[in-house]
Image (tube, rainbow, N blue to C red):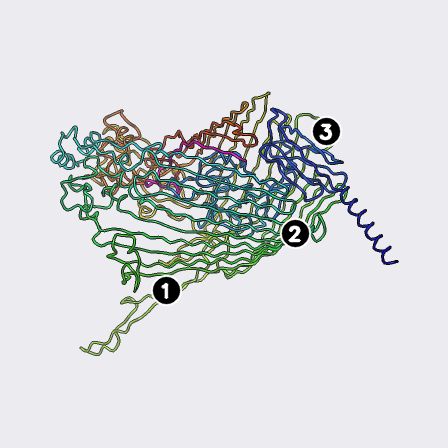
Amino acid sequence: MRIRILHACMLLCMCFSVMELTAQTMQVRGRVTSAVNQEPLAGVTVAVQGSNTATSTDQSGQYALEVAGNRATLVFSQLGMLSSQIVVTQSGVYDVRLQEGSDELEEVVVVGYGTQRKGDLTAPIATVDMEEMGKRTVTNPMEALQGSVTGVQVVSSGAPGTSPTVRIRGVGSFNNESPLYVVDGMFMDNIDFLNPNDIAEMSVLKDASGAAIYGVRAANGVILVTTKKGTLNMKPRITYNGYVGFQSPTNVLKMANAQEFAAYAMATGNEAFVNNSVSKFGGTAENPAMDTDWYKELLRSKALLTNHNLDIQGGADKITYTFGVNYLDQDGIMDARNDHRKYNIRMQTEAHVTDWLKLGFTAHFNNFRNYSANNAAFRQAYFASPLYPVYDPSLELAQPEKFGSSTVIGMPSSFWFANPVATAYYNNNQTKGFQILPSAYAEIQLWKDKLTFRTQWSQRYHSTHNINYQPVYYIDNDQRNNNSFLRSAQQRSTNYIFDNLLTYKDGKEKHHWSVLLGQSTREDRWRETWVQANDVPESEEFWYIGVGAQGTASATGYGEGGFRNAGISYFTRGTYDYDNKYLLTATFRADGSSKYQTKWGYFPSLGLGWVLSREKFMESQTLFNQLKIRGSWGKLGNDGIQPNAGYATVFSGNNYSGIFGSIGTTNGSRIPGYRISKFFTHVRWEVVEEWDGGLDFALLNNRLSGTVDYYHRKTNDLAFDRPIPFSWDRVYGNWGSVTNSGWEIGLQWKDRKDDFGYAIGGNLTTLKNRVNNLGGLESILNGYPEWSAEFPSRIELDQPINFYYGYEVEGVYQNQAQIEADPIASTYNTQNPDNPILPGYLKYKDQNQNGELDEEDRVNLGNYLPKLTYGFNIALDYKKFDFSIAFQGVAGNKIHNLNRAMRRKYSQMNADAAFIKDLWTGEGTSNSSPSAAGSVAPWNLQASSFFVESGAYLRIQNIQLGYNVDLAKGIPARIFLTADRPFIFTKYNGFTPEVAEMGFDANVYPIASSYSLGLRLSF
């Protein structure tokens, strides 16, 4: 009986417990709309304050949430909208309207190994507007940043599948200038593989305070990328985003036509080319019949560009998920086999296993195939005479295609004068590869909402296979290949990072603090194996090398290379704020590396902030909504330099040998001798020390917001090769230092009047780059490969890195009297009577006023780093229409036009039309360009300012027109027309002023404009 009573009591208690639990759970749902136009807002985060429970609205603005307890506060937030809170006390429908605007201080920003409120930041961390990035039809996420982030310079490359050059706050190393990319915790050298639509958040850590947490990898800045994830209690959402369009060559360089080239050739003593062309192809010397536009023959007028992305996101009460696929197809604008295909698969899931344990897994799968163009064809197209054809059926020996040859009009048989279309055609350079990035993590709440432990394993496996095949062909005695050639190379990279993080967050009254303790282990491996062979059949089924292979058994070459490096790190970060007004951030990282003799490096940083807008003395003012002053200091490392610098060289020969044993007429014996030259230096990572002062503000009811920063970063222990005194030897070591400093300003105005909204934004960055120390050397000569002697760049104390070094052109000698009155010219003519200076020759400035043109007259002619980079944009929306336009540009940089300068060695080459038009033709006709005869004279082909041009430009970066429409209930769609890089305004005489190779333009792959039609829809 007692047992039955006990069972009944237990059953009654359980019933009451269930009733109590049921009473403490509320089912809430509702719809979130814009307070301005009552349109539904998708992607609004709906979170229960003080808990991990959250969801997001679907495309129709609907949300549903299960809330524990009988009272809770729901927080509704979205980027670009003012957050809103409501208190719920029972189940029901709760509709919310959000106002436009933003409380930027409350926005959460991704920082190294965590997140912070934007209002708590003491470092100039830039966050990228992913919605604006999504408007760009680019194949690489970094190209979308061009002109949109202060302190970041992006130099685009036109070739399909290639990476842009990215510089953050100048250049502080001769070895590696690229930033570190961190994708979901994994260290990367680039993010080419990512689809911009897969990125949820991107932060740029520009200064030492923000980036010091990454130690030896952070000297060139850090770009943090977080990919998209699902949200708890989120209904499955399927989103398609894609476009199809074409690319078109823009700013095509106009070359001299047949008439212009013929007149120029006659004036420079090359009339034989004209006469031979007229004899073979017809016409007259003044008007030859053959007139080939080589760039027109080499370029496609339209090249396909298409991108398709499908994304699935969702979540239940304990788990979130996302799955995405992407396909990119891009043809190159060179009319040959050059294109890029890419397939991406991305997946992510996160499970809240218990109240204290969270498990997650993320994976990226990337597969690509790239056909690389032979860029030498663009250089040859600049050289090529228009007086011979692309195809010439009369050349009986030409095979397999009847390509024309410049030798038929008497041009030298040379690589430089080869048929550029044939060069592009007889090229098969393909790379296939794949990449896998898995990442798994566990997060444990050791003390709820205060103490968290997170452990994460991230890995990257990357494999590529490059095949370069050259078939048998013949055009002339120089442009031919007698034996087919195959080179096969495989590269494999394996990297892993194992992170362990312990984070403590707490506060009391007006005091708030957090402490991060971390440990990280990493390893990087890379191996390349290559083999090559001759006489390989043209069919791809025979492109194999080795005994028993289907192709050829005999290899003519074989090689292998690789490296393996490991490291371990310990780091910490502490933050403190009082009443959200006085801010402090301190970090410290100790890095151990296997690469160098010095095993450990230590990198501290400190940041301070003062939020003036929260002070009592600011309460009565109505101008500023936000106002914060901040300052930071820190040290960073760069381990992207050579791992060692020790070597030993043994010299032998007659200079070190002797004859011993000679007696009378008997000759002695030669005894070989040797000299050993050995130099060793202890190489260590380069160290950047930087300080930054900044101001963040928002005023006029948050309509105007902006940031202002001044930065000063100095790279110490700069590593480079330096000569050994009294020796031909050079040794690599940490010898120098360089400084980058400047201002960063970003402004945005945003407002709305009824159905019409508009936003205007702009940013600019200045840069002053100076070399401080070269280890006792005063200067180092550098330059473009193969041309560094004729047209050098120079590294010199108190000057920018790699400035162009040569004579300054003052004008052009207009008559003989000016020549005789100039001490430099008269002295030169006295010493060189057989090759005198004539009217129409360049006049160089006598810098030291000694009456002679000597080494002391060479000066700094400018360098490739812009003194100013800038961008601005305008966005408009009216009801269902939206329109945006973005501009980007640089100023203060120079480009060395090596295309024109190559005339120093190849006087028979063609010229661009502007060069021909500007030539001096008589007294008073030009004071900047020489005469036709003078353009091939050695006097005028010295390194000088004549070949150095302004690299300034303004480009319309993006224009987009969009229309929003509901295809059906709950299926919103957006149709958009986009033009990317449609126009550029520049005075530079080349395809593009975006030149990465220290500004030496030897005909880079042109930048193309693109035009597309796109569609985005969700359901």
Numbered disc 1: secondary structure = strand
Boundaries of the magenta span:
996-1019
Q: Residues within 10 Å of mark 1 (few under 14, many from 20)?
A: few
- Looking at the image, residue 305 sits to the left or right of residue 323; the answer is left
Relative to 955, is 724 above or below?
below
Relative to 690, is 281 above or below?
above
Quadrant housing residue 45: top right
Q: Is residue 502 magenta-colored?
A: no
**Which tag, 3 or 1, sits closer to the chain's start?**
3
**Which tag, 1 or 2, sits closer to the chain's start?**
2
Q: Which residue is mark 2?
A: 353
Residue under the image location 28 percent in, 67 percent down: 653
The kind of residue on which mark 1 rests is Thr
- Looking at the image, residue 925 sits to the left or right of residue 641; the answer is left
Residue 330 position within the rendered picture, expressed as x and y whole percent measured from the top left: 38, 40
The kind of residue on which mark 3 rests is Glu
Q: Which residue is more in the foreground, 996 or 227?
A: 227
Q: Is residue 1003 magenta-colored?
A: yes
Numbered disc 2: secondary structure = loop
Q: Which residue is mark 1?
A: 649
**Numbered circle sitting on residue 619:** 3
Residue 54 position within the rendered picture, expressed as x and y whole percent measured from the top left: 66, 41
